[in-house]
Amino acid sequence: MAVALTVLLATTLIVYLDRAGYHDNAHATLSLLDAAYYATVTLSTTGYGDITPVSDGARLANILVITPLRVVFLIILVGTTLEVLAERTRRQWRIGRWRSAVHDHAVIVGYGTKGRSAVQTLLGQGVAKESIVVVDPQRRVVEHATADGLVGVVGDATRTDTLLRAQLPRAAQVVVATERDDTAVLVALTVRQLNKAATLVAAVREDENAPLLRQSGADVVVTSSSSAGRLLGMSMLSPHAGAVMEDLLTYGRGLNVVERPVTRAEAGQSPRTCSDLVVAVVRGRRVLDFADPEAAVLQSTDRVITIQRAARPERD
């Protein structure tokens, strides 16, 4: 726009300074408005013919100056159009390629404090950025997510078309981290309508809304306000215990809570023989406490929830 306006103004100035060499069918002399009009129709190759150069100097200026400016103006016009069309085509091609390739990905609904923390945990556990899709109604928030290397979708997650753009029917995990509990319930219902197999984890502010989310299809419901309150109470009574719990909740620092499959060497053995500290055993759909008699012997199909020390960053 700046270059195009500069070319237009330059042409107007050239015509106006040599206005005596032009003939106007409507007026005896050319005004500044007439010069701007002639420059506009000339650069756009419209050429009505009502204003024409008649003197040798005006015609020479049209040949040597205004015609090159016309070419520059057309290059700007056509080039900008082609650039917009090419960028739109590349964007559609990238979206189509991503949609055809993505599967078993994680969809994060809401990229606030809870959503960003969930993403950081997934990244710390080795999930690729390309496998995380953020859905949020605010374009600014989605732009922030894409700047972080994630895939972003702008829209209301309670609407089916928004979740379809995030390829939710092919997702493996869904995290609902909206600001409002009623929105979380609607999102969970919409998610379960499109995908019944994905693991659905949702956050709510109030305990009384947790049963609604479970009835809406959430596999795990985390109550943010009460969980924070319990951590505060524990920290008050036992600051060290509170610090350990905070350490366990912060992935990648100190101690981590990790779920992993039972190795071949561990099958048939006691959880106490594992190299890391086993706190629970997942058998089928049940979670067995480490002290449960049924968890005394590990099976090859079990998964164990363990506490591991986070890997220390390498020093140069």
Image (cartoon, rainbow, N blue to C red):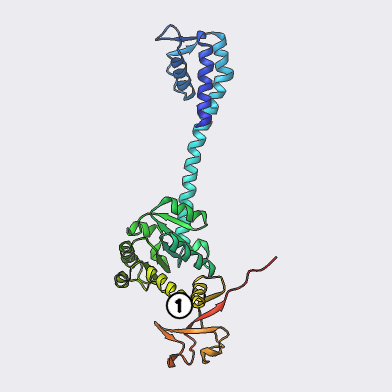
Residue at the image position 47 percent from the left and 64 percent from the top = 117
Q: Position of residue 31 (x, y in %)?
A: 45, 12
Q: Residues within 10 Å of mark 1 (few under 14, many from 20)?
A: few
Which residue is outermost to the front?
237
Which residue is outermost to the right?
316
Which residue is denoted by mark 1 in the rendering? 237
Look at the numbered disc 1 and give the secondary structure of its residue. helix
Q: Is residue 274 above or below residue 58?
A: below
Residue at the image position 50 percent from the left and 36 percent from the top = 80
Q: Position of residue 100 (x, y in %)?
A: 45, 60
Residue at the image position 55 percent from the left and 78 percent from the top = 308
Q: Quadrant of the C terminus?
A: bottom right
Q: Is residue 217 above or below residue 273?
A: above
Which residue is outermost to the top?
28
Q: Position of residue 75 (x, y in %)?
A: 53, 31
Q: Is 15 in front, or is 25?
A: 15
* Left or right: where 136 falls relative to 250: left
Q: Is residue 223 above or below residue 146?
A: below
Q: Position of residue 163 (x, y in %)?
A: 37, 60
**Which of the 4 image quarters holds residue 186?**
bottom left
Q: Amino acid at mark 1?
A: Leu
**Which of the 4 image quarters holds residue 215?**
bottom left
